[in-house]
Amino acid sequence: MWYLNSNYSKYMTGDPSKFLSLEMKHEGYVTFVDNNKGKIIGHGNIDNPPSTMIENVLLIIGLKRNLLSISQLCDKGYKIEFDKKIVS
């Protein structure tokens, strides 16, 4: 399951098994909302059937959720609408 997130500008996961392609490389740290830091240990692409491929996903040690960046989705031309009952 992927969660939409407006706090971060990148797609992120802590699960290396999700990657179709993965380049392992220390790329710094991300700072979470609670000010804890997560180490970026790689990046790659994730195949997400039946949806589209998710590109440039960061692999973060210890991250428990899969986060989709709303800003990255909008930059790729996706339109996201929020309503009281649904997100489309």
Image (tube, rainbow, N blue to C red):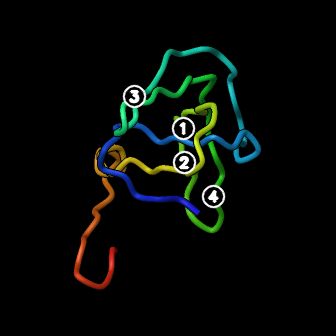
Q: Disc 1 and disc 2: Cα gap in Å?
A: 7 Å
Residue plotted at (60% across, 14% down) = 26
Rendered-image quadrant of the C terminus: bottom left
Disc 3 designates what residue? 31
Q: Amino acid at mark 3?
A: Thr
Find residue 24 and report its horizontal and vertical position in percent: 69, 21
Residue plotted at (68% across, 23% down) = 23
From the viewer's side, name the closer residue of 24 and 20. 24
Of labels 4 and 1, earlier in sequence is: 4
The reply to whether dot 3 and dot 4 touch (C-beta < 8 Å) is no
The reply to whether dot 1 and dot 2 touch (C-beta < 8 Å) is yes
Instruction: Look at the picture and state if 44 lies above or below 20.
Output: above
User: Which is more foreground, mark 2 or mark 3?
Assistant: 3
The reply to whether dot 4 and dot 1 touch (C-beta < 8 Å) is no
Find residue 60 and report its horizontal and vertical position in percent: 58, 32
Disc 2 designates what residue? 54
Quadrant of the rendered structure where residue 9 is? top left
Q: Disc 3 and disc 4: Cα gap in Å?
A: 26 Å
Disc 1 designates what residue? 57
Q: Amino acid at mark 1?
A: Val
Of labels 3 and 1, earlier in sequence is: 3
User: Which is more foreground, mark 3 or mark 1?
Assistant: 3
Find residue 61 and report its horizontal and vertical position in percent: 63, 31
Side of 13 relative to 16 (left or right): left
Disc 4 designates what residue? 48
Q: Amino acid at mark 4?
A: Asn
Side of 7 relative to 23 (left or right): left
Residue plotted at (63% across, 22% down) = 41
